[in-house]
Amino acid sequence: MNGSRRNSGSSLVSSSSASSNLSHLEEDSWILWGRIVNEWEEVRKKKEKQLKDQVRKGVPHHFRAIVWQLLCNAQNMPIKDQYSELLKMTSPCEKLIRRDIARTYPEHEFFKEKDSLGQEVLFNVMKAYSLVDREVGYCQGSAFIVGLLLMQMPEEEAFCVFVKLMQDYRLRELFKPSMAELGLCMYQFECMIQEQLPELHMHFQAQSFHTSMYASSWFLTIFLTSFPLPVATRIFDIFMCEGLEIVFRVGMAILQMNQTELIQLDMEGMLQHFQKVIPHQFGSGPDKVIQAAYQVKYNAKKMKKLEKEYTTIKTKEMEEQVEIKRLRTENRLLKQRIDTLEKESASLADRLIQGQVTRAQEAEENYLVKRELATVKQQSEEASAQLEQARKTISELQQQQQQQQPQAKGVPRYSEESVMQLERELVQARLKEAESQCALKEMQDKVLDMEKRNTSLPDDTNVARLQEELIGVKLREAEAVTGLKELRQQVRDLEEHWQRHVARTAGRWKESPKKNTLSELQDELMSVRLREAEAQAELREARQRIMELETQNQIQSNQLRRSEQENRCLHEREQSLTVQNKDLHVELKEIKRRQAEIECKSKEEVMAVRLREADNIAAMAELQQQISELEIEKEEGKVQGHLNHTDSSQYIRDLRDQITELKHEICCLKGQRGLAGHATFDGIHIVNHYGGDDESYQSSDEDGVKDSILPADGQQRSNSRIRLHPKLGDSDSEDEDGEALRLSVPQGKSTTV
């Protein structure tokens, strides 16, 4: 034991107290518990019943630290090594822990002074556990258990024992934020009271004295806040060995011992009795209450059954709460829908009234337009009659003028003036007729516009249907108001009857519970009748809501049917527009195809023109080649010798033939190129240039060919040229480029073309 204890200032056990004067009984107890501690594993397995008996008799104060650790298997826990690290961390529950430390054992020496060692180690343990179990964190009441542990052992060991208690002794479920385990314990304890102490249970029910008002602290602190510390410590010994069963037993024992006094008290008196009287009943020692506790009937199987029942009840309550939430949500949605439908109904009524007013206005306008149209028609007929009369008068006057030839000079003048006057009247009549026709056309346009607007308005059947719906809604609303007034009157009558009944039975509460049974039954009957009336009122309100919803549903279905008809018309129009769009797409494709064909034809024509130009260019190149060949032949002729007169004549004739052939080829080329405005070769001028003088011999032919071969002095020049002049019209000129075609003939050679 000394090896398992540490020299910490937080322990209240001192080694010097072990050597105090001990009686023989205490010495035997010390020896027995020393043997139990030394042989703990064997005693726990083979002698569990004897161990429970010894624990019920009480654990010696000096052995409590080690025995509690052994009972909950808290020795050598790995979390003990983390304790110092946890103290360095920050917990979100530190403020709450600091606030409640001063309220924990305020009269005990170890925790009395502020910022004392006891308060500091208590804060450390609570903070460390709030960091280990963040779901629970810190809960009021757990500090009393930790304080009791710190009175017996150092803070590290107290921390380990507290962790074990929370995990294995149902304390964690008790201290969770939902406190579901505490509710289960209250339910089980109340069932035990109902079974074993029925009269006390009925008294509690009559006074509305719930179990949680006095027993919740018993389970949360294991009687540490209800009994003196020695008594609570003895109960805690048994709790460490047997669990929460001892709390149920001790609680029932307390109620059995105080049943007579509690039945005679009201709610406030019972609260005072639990707080001030019961804690001082066990000043002599805890043996009396512990013996009474083990006289209480406790059935573990029945407690399991009650646990299942409580779980079922809570599940049903959760389901009911979910259903209530769902119904509330549906009710809210229905109210919103009713508001929406009421707004739509009001808008429909407004639209109906507006439509009727609009139709009345349109009818009045239509009547006025018809009257104006009739007036215009009458004016038009009158103007037409006047015009016809004027025409007849003019024709008659013209006939009279043609038949008669007046002799007097003033008579023709009078006839002409009459004709001019009649013509002016005719013009005015025609103008009036034109104005009447314009007014008639405008009136016809107005009539067509009015007819279109009338067709857009709702027809008489729809208006009648809307009126019927509005009348039905108003009738249902009136019925609902009448039924609601009747229900309110019925509830008012029941409340008056209830008040009279309360006044009659006011003096019966002071009598005994047995005499009050009849009055309680009467009260229950009245409450049942009231609930029945309220249920009937709710049922009638629900029916009224259903009727209103059905009416709104019918209105909505009518609106939906009308919207479907409009949608169908729009769909048909959309289909027709789609067909038109398809036709337009087909036409667009046809136009594109035609455009492509035209572009292809134009490209082919351009290519043909380019090919013809290329052929013409090739023909021109061939002609240039022939001319170059002629120049070469001319040079060869000059090399052969001088030309005589006869030879030159023969040469000229040859040239003339060749020129004729060349002209023919040029005409063919000109016809192919279609160049009508281009220059044509009408003749060739052959000129010999001499360097000595300007004198020359010339010979002409009928085509205007000029030949100059020999000079006058009979000497030959070194160079001769043949110039080909194109003839434009009747005059000699150069070609289009302003250049002449010159053939150079060397001296002493014959010239041939």
Image: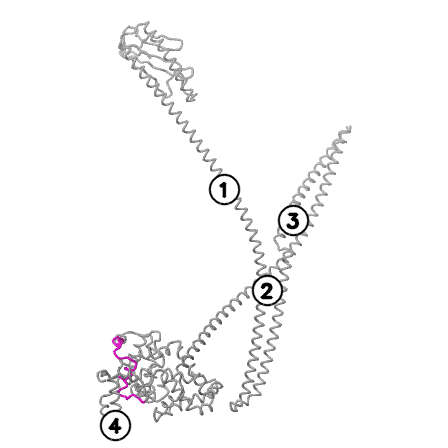
Answer left or right for 544 relative to 612: right
| Residue 576 vertical position relative to residue 318 in the rendered view, above or below | above
Dot placed on the residue nearer the N-terminal end, 1 or 4: 4
Foreground disc of the pair 1, 4 = 4
Q: Which residues are magenta?
A: 57-83
Q: Residue type at mark 2: give it.
A: Thr
Query: Label 4: how many residues lie within 10 Å, few (<14), some (14-19) or many (20+)?
Result: few
What's the CA distance linking mark 4 and mark 3? 130 Å
Main SS of residues in magenta:
helix
Query: Label 2: how many residues lie within 10 Å, few (<14), some (14-19) or many (20+)?
Result: some
Q: Residue type at mark 3: give it.
A: Val
Q: x, y percentage for residue 744?
A: 30, 14
Q: Pointers 3 and 1 in contact (CB under 8 A)?
A: no
Residue sitting at x 57%, y 83%: 498
Q: Which residue is mark 2?
A: 551
Foreground disc of the pair 2, 4 = 4
Q: Quadrant of the C terminus?
A: top left
Q: Which residue is mark 4?
A: 24
Q: Pointers 1 and 4 in contact (CB under 8 A)?
A: no
Answer left or right for 40 relative to 606: left
Q: Which residue is mark 3?
A: 447
Foreground disc of the pair 3, 1 = 1
